[in-house]
Image: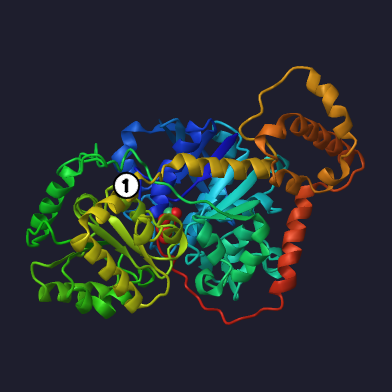
Amino acid sequence: MKILYATSEAVPFCKTGGLADVAGSLPPALAEQGAEVAVVLPLYQRVKERFGSQLKFECYDFVDLAWRHSYCGLFSLEKDGVTWYFLDNEQYFNRPDLYGYIDDGERFGFFSRAIVQMLPHFKFWPEVIHCNDWQTALVPIYLKDDGVREDRFRSIKTTLTIHNIEYQGRYGMQTLGDLFGLDHGWADDGTIIMDGDVNLMKGAILCADAINAVSPTYANELKLSYFAHRLENIMRRCEYKLSGVLNGIDMKLYDPAADQRITANYSVDDLGGKNTDKAALQRMMGLREEPHVPIVAIVSRLVSHKGLDLICEVLHDMMELPMQLVILGKGDRKYEEFFHWAAQQYHGRMAVRLDYNEELSMAIYAGADLFLMPSKSEPCGLSQMIAMRYGTVPIVRETGGLKDTVQPYEAWRDAGNGFTFANYASSDMLHVIREAVYLYKDYPDAFSRLRKRAMKCDFSWARSAKDYLRIYANITGQPWPPVAEEPAPVVEEAAPVVEEPAPAVEEAAPAVEEPTPAAEEKPVKKAAKKTAKKTEKKVRKDEKPAEKPEKKASVKKAAAKKETKKKGPAAKDKKEKPAE
Ligand code: GLC
């Protein structure tokens, strides 16, 4: 299986959020499972500065974006069994930040167009292009666009991962042709239009062969207006190709037994070092060195959907509990000011650092006892998994990936790996914080067992990589794991099955979408493959139009039916936020 993973950021090259962590870990995990993987990223200034000497220049070409004809260089680097490609255009990417520029639409329009145009220069012709968020959402669209499409693109399937549906790539109508080089057909049938704006995420959701959210719960939430930021109807319409795949974390990078970034190492069998880390954290943050007072920690961007309003509402009640509070993060001014002010009221018991600081965050994961994430919505969330790995017990609201990774503590049967609350209500949050703090204070043995259960959770990427490979297998029709070639007898067996081609053929894609259990698979699959090939030939003979162009037409038509009815006010949000 040949996978091209398209992303606007990836650790260790460039990062603004969780997307970078995922894009840095998933491709190597796919490669470990036996897939051939390449990743494609923009060549940002910071990548050039930090990795420039390791980059190999491959070639250059020119990329057409509407009336623009721009240089695009291709650089590469081999790492962790994956080829990392970087697309160079200084005008677009040689800037200090990744996002936040007035021309972000043009920059990522160029990036997506360049991915498609540079395909012949990559080391393999991909079977799947895996896109992520709005920045690469134009790739599935361009592959189906008449102005761009080439016959050979037909063999490429696309999948789109939605890390956060809030950021959709919305631009004014005039950008459709002038910026993105798409003809008005895309607007007329509504495929790429939402509330009067060009909406790249919507277009990709409709055009991609598969879409997934970064947790099963978020996949379900995306069908509800509370979470979907106006795309709930599209999500419901595309439910047939939607799945939820939980992110993992890099278990080697985040390993309290080996992590060089923390003061003392420890493991689930010997937690001694965690006490040292706690004392170190208290010193570092100017907190009283009290070993038996639980530290509740927050490491988060300080923005509304992280549920910070709940904390603001009951902060003083929280601080009446026998606990200390540590907050690390920056973001909206109102939260920064509030937390800064509050920390002054609770000197020695509450400490705040308004910063993005990787090193300090590790000291917090290692030194704290409880980790608070009361998010209003959380597509997956990686911090709660990292916290658990470091024995810092999470307190979360049951949403998205938080719900999928944290099972509530149940005292009566000594089960669960954290604390949860369901309603977005500060009183409910306060109730579980109180429960957690008093479990720590009054039942240290029970708390210690809970901590160990959290530490033992397996959040490795291997599991998620398998889920993605299953998605790739479904859309390409290739079996995964690859079926070993078997000699002759299978041909004989295949004969009767070939007699039943019709249903499998008419709906080739769905037939593959539900692979039969591996154990019974081999002979049938081979037969099915043969059947599919035969009918493919038949179809060609009969000169029926091929499946994919039809697909575009039907996608577009389907979209058109609904979209022409809707003409809401154009709520414009031109400046896209960073990837979440
Ligand atoms: C975004 C989401 C976060 C998720 C991450 C990686 O940052 O907000 O919940 O963990 O993407 O998928």
- The image position of residue 453, as x and y in percent, is 34, 49
Q: Nearer the viewer, residue 563 or 478?
A: 478
- The image position of residue 237, as x and y in percent, is 67, 65
> In what element is the residue under mark 1?
helix
- Mark 1 C-beta to ligand 1 under 8 Å: no
Q: Residue at x 88, y 39 (%)?
A: 500
Q: Residue at x 38, y 46 (%)?
A: 457
Label 1 Cα crowd, 10 Å radius (few <14 / some 14-19 / many 20+):
many
Q: Quadrant of residue 444?
A: bottom left
Q: Amino acid at mark 1?
A: Met
Above or below, 238 against 469 in this view is below
- The image position of residue 532, as x and y in percent, is 81, 37
Q: Nearer the viewer, residue 213 or 49?
A: 213
Q: Residue furthest front?
A: 412
Q: Residue furthest bottom?
A: 569
* Tag 1 residue: 455
Q: How is the image coloured?
A: rainbow
Could you tell whether 321 is left or right of 53 in the image? left
Q: Residue at x 29, y 48 (%)?
A: 452
Q: Quadrant of residue 440?
A: bottom left
Residue 16 appears in the picture as rendered: no
Q: Residue furthest right?
A: 542
Residue 480 appears in the picture as rendered: yes
- Position of the N terminus by quadrant: top right
Q: Nearer the viewer, residue 508 or 348?
A: 348
Could you tell whether 269 is left or right of 26 in the image? left
Locate ligand 1 by image quadrant.
bottom left
- The image position of residue 141, as x and y in percent, is 63, 55
Could you tell whether 426 is left or right of 534 in the image? left
